[in-house]
Image (cartoon, rainbow, N blue to C red):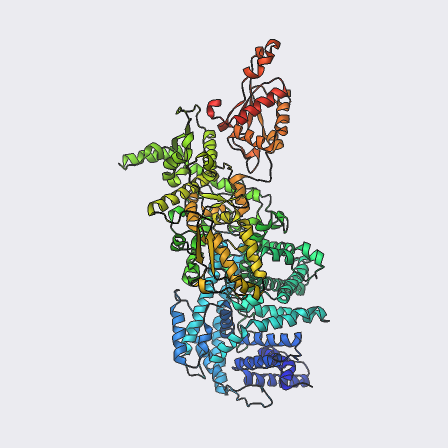
Amino acid sequence: TMNSNEWYQTYLIPCLVQVLKGTLLVSTKISGGAHDDFQKQQKQQQNNIHQTVSNMVNGRESILLSNALDIWDSCHSSKSSSSTAATAVSMIELIQVVLERRSKDVGVLTSLVIRGQDNIQALVGNDEKDNGNTISSSVAALHVDEVESDEDEDLEDHEDAMEVESTSPFPAAATSAAITTPTSTSRSKRHKKAASKSKKQRYRNKKLSNKQSYYNSKRKSTYTRQEILTVPKLDRLYQEQVFRLRKTTLEKLQKSITKKPTSRYYDPLVVKIALRLAEPHRWIQWSNEVFATGENQNDKHHTNSSCATFVNMLYTLLQCSTGLRTAGAGTTGVQSAFMSQLAFDATLLEGLWTSASTLLKLQDDEQPGMKQNRQQEEEYKLRELSIVKTMSVFSDLFAHHLLAVNDEEFLSQYTSVHHHHEQASPAAIVAEDLIGRLRHLLYGLYWIRPVVVTDVGIPDQVVAVVAPSSIDAPQKVDFETQLSRHRARLMLSGTKLWNSLYERWCRLVRSQSLTDESSWWFPHLMTKDDTNAVNADVSGTHIMHDSDSEHDLHNSSSMDIDSESDDNDLNDDGSDSDEDSDDEHGQQERTAAEQESDALAEAFKDPKMARILTCIPQALPFDRRVKLFSSLLHYDRLRTQDEDADFRHMMREMAEGDGGDFANLGVGRIRVQINRQNIYSESFKTLNKLGNHLKKKVQITFVNQHGAVEPGIDGGGVFKEFLDDLIKEAFYPDKEHGSTVPQLFSVTPLQTLAVNTSRPALLTQEQHQMLFQNYEFLGRVLGKAVYESILVEPQFCLPFLNKLLGKQNTLDDLKNFDAEVYKHLLNYRNMNAEEIEAMGLNFEWTFGNKSSTRTVELIPGGSSIPVTKQNVILYVNLVAHQHLNIQGSIETKAFLRGFRDLIPASWVRLFSGYELQKLISGDDAVQGIDVAGLKVTMQYAGGYHPDQPIIQSFWEVLEEITPEQQRKFLRFMTSCSRQPLLGFQSLSPAPCIQQIRLPDHLFDPAQIKNIEKNTNLPTSSTCMNLLKLPNYRNKQLLKRKLLDAIESGAGFELT
């Protein structure tokens, strides 16, 4: 009832897999044997058969696999295909066995094809000269040091193996071709070479095992910084190994060109197989057959085995695509068709997640080392390996999947609310469950049993489960070593996915929370003491400041906005130079990310904690990160505001005869006199030139509108008031009342601030320079506020906050900038082909307002390229990119230069965008102030105590007044209208109410009518957080006087 191809698929391919496995196991089976002579004779006969078949297929694995793929494709070309999960698994097992025997060619080439950065297709041509040129140019493009390899020895080993007939080992149709068995001489030669190579490999493995055992023993104690490298550096090490593997592979291809066609290392058939294995449709088909039928399988063991076989192969093929950056999201702009198609196959994603969840649940029920049965211990280890591989594959694919899923689609597909209403199946992926599972895995990889530097490496393409003495089998590598390498790879892919989910959570947290904030926190790290977490000697001196370098640093998990070229910014034409970046540029970016991460990591004593803070800071609660950030600032201020050290430096400079502005910069304090009527212009003229010297203490003396110097000595409070007023004037200039401050920021429809991009079209070079200096000054002013832990008013839009963090904005960030444009772009995505064509859109976009407009091309020649259903997603993302990352980028760069003069980029990357806003202006969720918290912290002096009637009346009044009045009171007392981020207990010095005694005659009944006129108002010493409160005799008088004081808005002459 079957045609020949169906018979081959159903019976011959599974049989062939068993034969090949039998060939690999022949050495162990020969050593067996029964006690009975008859059984020994039977065993010997069986071994003879295995040996014969081994000789027949040896060296022809590629031909076997090629014809098996032909059979499979032929069977599935018709609609009446009778494929099952069993036949799919048999096909995958055949690929696995072939890759075990030829893992250095087919497996590596396939992985490189999937990576999508090499034109392997060009190697299949018939013209060897052309191929050689192509390969030579590919190898010449590799700017890496020579690495040690055994390629010459490998070429010799495989020359004899490839000297066979290229006819099919089994019939592709109804006829069968003869197979020539290799001669005994060739077989003996191969045996000798294999034995020699095996001996060398065993020595290497023993050496590696000893090295790994050493570091395994170290894991029981403390860790050094040399072992616990930052994750960007671990990623760099992994990518370097991928790079070397690629280099070695292409060099082998180049050398093979000179060999005769029947004996060269890489023949065209091998390359063609790699290209065929990299076709995504077949893996989607196999996944549908493996996962879709899993629930109907009666044999659970068979089902688990089928899934494991499929995952193992997919894990192998994705080895060159793993990393902290999602394929296609980096600066190379290369998109992997394989990743893109697999990432959007629902059956594959849900099958991988279901398989991983099942294994994780089993693993949760057991603990290593608790079982007495050795077999159960082995099962636990093997299950851990399966979890690591499955989650690594899932993380790579799902992170790629999330690139093209907007927030609305994500909420509808992957949140528990949706699944509850739609009665989704248990196999559906729920974000909350995924976040929890990833947190558990990453907690083990980062903290419990952290990945160390020696763990990083590309595991064997296929883990050998065969006897190491087999002729063509790879040597068995120590299981713990292999598991460590797999765990290191999971750390990279798992971190990538976890950070991607966290970025989405941050965007949605104010409108639709996916999960509670505590779901991101690592266990046992939520309340850890941070008293001595920071290295005082390196926190301020070893951090690389961006002002010292023209090359801004990049975040390892997302692109820095500074990666755009200056020319592009100056022209503002929308061109994106990132698309032309090469591998070398990518390596430079990763190096910059490592330098920044390492600089921040050195500031913390615990290397494990440093690794977490530099890559997944969300694993610690926000309050803990604020405390650590405050410690970094504290130790840096001790260094920069050390007046004694500055004085010694000044005297040394004077003794050496060097000049300098010692009046300001040499004595630790900068004294400035500012007229309140021209606060912005005078501050710009006086302070902007200081650059990062603005870190020093600044003492302000105000001059009022009459030209008189206001009384009062600045002990910190006057400066806080000055900074608050300056920032209000700079970010919210009152044009209606004649403010001359340039409009550097504009208000978005969401009432947040964004860079003002509507500057005049024609500006002179001098005007451009002055504009950018103003942005630099604003950056320094805001940086100074953060540096001194002074909360200020400006509320920035999320895309701008992302730029402060060095992150690239995406389409979903547009709704936090211009919700109307975001809505229109989403509508374009949902239109059909006819509707899009009727719109008459091209790849260009018009910006501006009614008075001035400007049209830019989104891609070169975009004005003549129509938008279609096929490219509308690209169009939508380019428009969002233009709005969020290109427009105003040069102004943002200038602002960042000023901001990073005081606050290194790596420090603020401890926080998300919304958390950074809290760091700047406090928690907006708190209306007014926390009166109860202030009451607990308040100190009393001058005879006051908390039980006195006047103090009780004071707290009643403070609770009764409006939130706006409460903030004015806080400003009156502390010079800052926003309460400290860590609560009033973090104020230094502690807030205090001091009694001011009023004369008794004021309360004489005869003078009662004039009491309000004759009694003083409350005053304050903001530098001491001190409220000087007269002892009023009744609550009504207290309330009126207090409101008069805080509403007056007068300067320090009031006191």
Q: Give the image quarter of residue 413.
A: bottom right
Q: Position of residue 464 (x, y in %)?
A: 56, 71
Q: Give the image quarter of residue 626.
A: top right
In front here: 1037 or 360?
1037
Vertical placement of 933 versus 514: above or below? above
Q: Residue at x 62, y 72 (%)?
A: 286
Vertical placement of 1051 versus 870: above or below? above
Q: Residue at x 41, y 72 (%)?
A: 251
Can you say which quadrant of the picture contains the N terminus?
bottom right
| Side of 931 relative to 795 (left or right) | right
Q: Is residue 557 visible?
A: no
The image shows a total of numbered marks equal to 0
In front here: 771 or 383?
771
| Side of 329 relative to 966 (left or right) | left
In front here: 81 or 588?
81
Q: Residue at x 43, y 72 (%)?
A: 250
Q: Position of residue 493 (x, y in %)?
A: 55, 60
Vertical placement of 344 versus 887: above or below? below
Q: Is residue 373 visible?
A: yes
Q: Position of residue 506 (x, y in %)?
A: 57, 50
Which residue is farthest left? 657
Q: Position of residue 690 (x, y in %)?
A: 37, 38
Which residue is farthest top? 1006
